[in-house]
């Protein structure tokens, strides 16, 4: 827009809402995933998403949602409902709410006719003319990958964007706007974000320890925002900061990360987005160590997670899923007597499995995991969720008995997380 | 409620809104997936979802969304924001909007204290008392899997449900309500739904074969609706019908299922919701067969999937993840010469792995899987995604070489799906 003083300054866009339109998105079968992409793109411009909604192909509901959004945000992005059928109501409803009458844009009709002739070797069906209807004053956004053009509508200082629903149409259209008109309207105070991952702790205690930090971070010249999230077997801490110079945001987050590390120590296993299997894999690769695992209750899950990481064949040598006692004895040399004396789920058996794995395979690290994943097989002394884990290296064998809570798959996952975390702490 | 005439009849609940609360759900990193489950459950009662929204941990936005929803629907389900921290605003905001003051429910506090003592061997942090705050007149919904209780609040003829965000807490709580108080409040024109799962086909061809059936089903007295969904390694066909008598819907769906089976034959592996590992497990259990797997590129994933099924220790004897060539030779007796002649990723090696597994373990079925999961390791003749799979039984060994498309984890999953499907077809 340029030329200081020549045009009135408009307030920069800072808050957006996303409306995904389509009855199929209100079934149990479909999720609106466009909004993740839209959010990510908007955040890079410093625009925050205040809320997002999914609305069916329903004029009344959509009109209400559009009105609500215009009351509360500077930028409204609607995806979907721009097709040629009666179900496609977005264009009509938005024009109605904004009070801009629709008129056919002949250049769009022409483009549609050409598209049908070249792509589908057929005449354009008459219903597709609806896609050429444009609200007065709107700008047309070209769609290279489909028939529905997008629309940019200025409404006072607010902007309404209508984009088609298919991701391969929406994404390039939004990306192009990000490089031009949207960038020019945003504040430029971009958001930077960092995720810390934490193992071996529970959420509320972690929150209590971190709360004094949150308070301090909020007072900084570039304040850092924190959100804590408990996931199965780990806690995530999301840090974010915004500043016109991204380097300033990064610097503030860097200091906040250092604060967390000083408070939680080695319980923080990732500050760069890597998951636990990547962290363990990188430690093994860096130290040129090979690993073999003897998994019982985890049924191969730990090895499967480790081998999800590209390049893991450098350090994963083999594993054994010793579901039966026979397999524990034959493949790992676990003494029959140890199983009889302590039971298959016991600290001594986990240690014998880890050490047996090291003895039978040409590896540096052996892991043994044995437990009761449930729902059956629990006893009063060893309830469902009891899992014994041992990690053996050339220097020592460490072991621990855990009690996990949850369903079978959750016990398996938590056991895999605990085993990987034990390996990480021994190698770190 | 019962006793005709004794209590005023309330209008049945027919329209719901779902609000997912949590700033993390407004980042590019997280999707609200609870709403899929909630929608499915509500649909079974004949309740339709009018819209759904995601709101951050923001009092003003949440209050506005709650007010809007109460204007437009009979049932509002909020998930998330019931934790003990300052970010958890759902309880406060909803109580505020509804005008019900919060008071501490000592019985909840007591339960929380006990939970902390028994689960975490620690005293309850004081902040957790916030989870015992209950709006006047609300009913408490017990949470067997977490600290946050749910709340059922009657607001005139409307119902507001507050449920915790973690799916493993929300799901059982909602399911329990579906069996009781929610069912009693719904209209009863329930939707019935059936999911058919199909392996070994591609979507567009399947769709073409099924299209004539769709047209026929739509003409029925109780019409059956169909949606086809391609997932990784399988296709799902969702059938649904609605009628005041659920038996009528079930009967119509039953005939539609028979039509599909007649058209697609044994490619349909599940008509009752079971996944492939359950179907294979049930076949093994019914025939009293035991299985052992030699996994290379799948890294334990197949065994992990099989052992996700409760009771799988009856038929999973052991597995070997033979990531290195040494392991293939030592643990499975794959001849060195076979590896040298054909390469580790080859049909003869897969066969030798499957048969070696049968020879080394006391099992009936042996499986061998070897492939290139990528991103590295591909060659012109054996590109990334090449996977050889063999299944050996006492009667025969079958093998096949596949070429899967996708990233490493997708190749692993498709290979696991193909291997399980081969076992299924051999046992069926």
Image: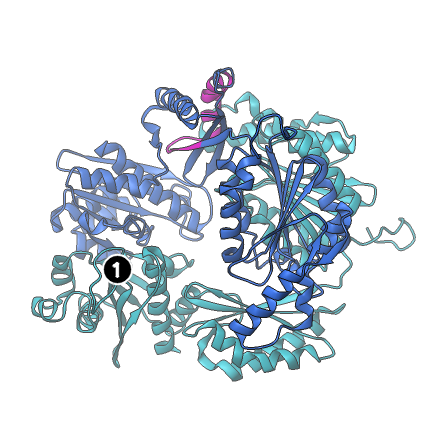
Chain colours: A blue, B cyan
Residue at image location 52% in from the left, 41% down from the top = A180
- Residue at the disc numbered 1: B297
Residue B24 appearing in the image: no
Q: Quadrant of the C terminus of chain A?
A: top left
Report whether A81 appears left or right of A168.
right
Residue closer to the observer: B195 or A348: B195
Residue A233 locus on image (x, y percent) = 41, 39
Residue at (72%, 36%) from the top-left corner? A71
Asked if residue B75 lies left or right of residue B275, the reply is right
Tell me: A376 left or right of B59: left
**Which residues fall within the magenta stretch?**
A193-215
- The N terminus of chain A, quarter of image: top right
Q: Is residue B19 left or right of residue A397?
A: right
Q: Residue furthest left?
A: B337
Letter of the chain that mark 1 sits on in the rendering: B
Q: Is residue B342 above or below residue B37?
A: below
Q: Nearer the viewer, residue A200 or A159?
A: A159
Residue A316 lies in the magenta-colored region: no
The residue that appears at 12% across and 62% down in the rendered structure is B329
Is residue A209 located in the magenta-colored stretch of the structure?
yes
When the figure is inspected, residue B397 is found, relative to residue A251, above or below; the finding is: below
Q: Name the image quarter holding residue B26.
A: top right
- Expressed as whole percent of the image width and height from the top left, the position of residue A145 reads 51, 61
């Amino acid at each position: 827009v340029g030329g200081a003083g020549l045009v009135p300054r408009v307030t920069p866009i800072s808050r957006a809402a996303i409306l995904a339109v389509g009855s199929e998105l209100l079934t149990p079968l479909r999720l609106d995933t466009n909004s993740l992409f839209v959010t990510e793109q908007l955040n890079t411009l410093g625009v925050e998403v205040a809320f997002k909604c999914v609305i069916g192909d329903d004029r009344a509901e959509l009109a209400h949602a559009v009105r609500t959004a215009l009351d509360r945000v500077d930028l409204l992005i609607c995806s979907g409902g721009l097709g040629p059928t009666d179900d496609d109501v977005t264009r009509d409803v938005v024009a109605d709410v904004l009070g801009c009458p629709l008129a056919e844009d002949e250049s769009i009709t022409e483009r549609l006719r050409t598209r049908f002739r070249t792509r589908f070797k057929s005449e354009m069906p008459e219903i597709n003319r609806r896609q050429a209807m444009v609200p007065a004053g709107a700008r047309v956004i070209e769609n290279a990958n489909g028939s529905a053009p997008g629309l940019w509508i200025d409404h006072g200082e607010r902007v309404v964007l209508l984009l088609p629903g298919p991701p391969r149409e929406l994404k390039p259209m939004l990306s192009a706007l990000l490089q031009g008109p949207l960038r020019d309207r945003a504040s430029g105070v971009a958001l930077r974000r960092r995720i810390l991952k934490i193992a071996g702790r529970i959420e509320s205690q972690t929150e209590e320890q971190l709360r004094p930090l949150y308070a301090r971070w909020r007072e900084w010249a570039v304040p850092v925002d924190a959100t804590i999230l408990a996931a199965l077997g780990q806690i995530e801490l999301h840090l974010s900061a915004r500043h016109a110079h991204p380097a300033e945001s990064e610097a503030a987050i860097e200091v906040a990360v250092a604060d967390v590390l000083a408070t939680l120590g080695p319980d923080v296993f990732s500050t760069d987005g890597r998951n636990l299997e990547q962290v363990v894999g990188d430690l093994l690769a860096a130290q040129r160590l090979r690993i073999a695992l003897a998994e019982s209750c985890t049924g191969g899950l730990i090895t499967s997670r480790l081998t999800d990481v590209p390049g893991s064949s450098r350090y994963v040598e083999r594993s054994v899923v010793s579901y039966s006692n026979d397999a524990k004895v034959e493949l790992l040399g676990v003494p029959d007597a140890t199983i009889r004396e302590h039971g298959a789920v016991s600290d001594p058996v986990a240690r014998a499995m880890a050490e047996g794995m090291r003895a039978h395979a040409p590896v540096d690290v052996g892991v043994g995991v044995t437990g009761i994943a449930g729902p059956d097989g629990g006893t009063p002394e060893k309830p469902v969720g009891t899992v014994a884990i041992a990690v053996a290296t050339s220097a020592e064998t460490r072991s621990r008995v855990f009690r996990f809570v949850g369903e079978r798959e959750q016990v398996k996952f938590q056991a895999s997380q605990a085993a990987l975390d034990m390996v990480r702490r021994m190698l770190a």
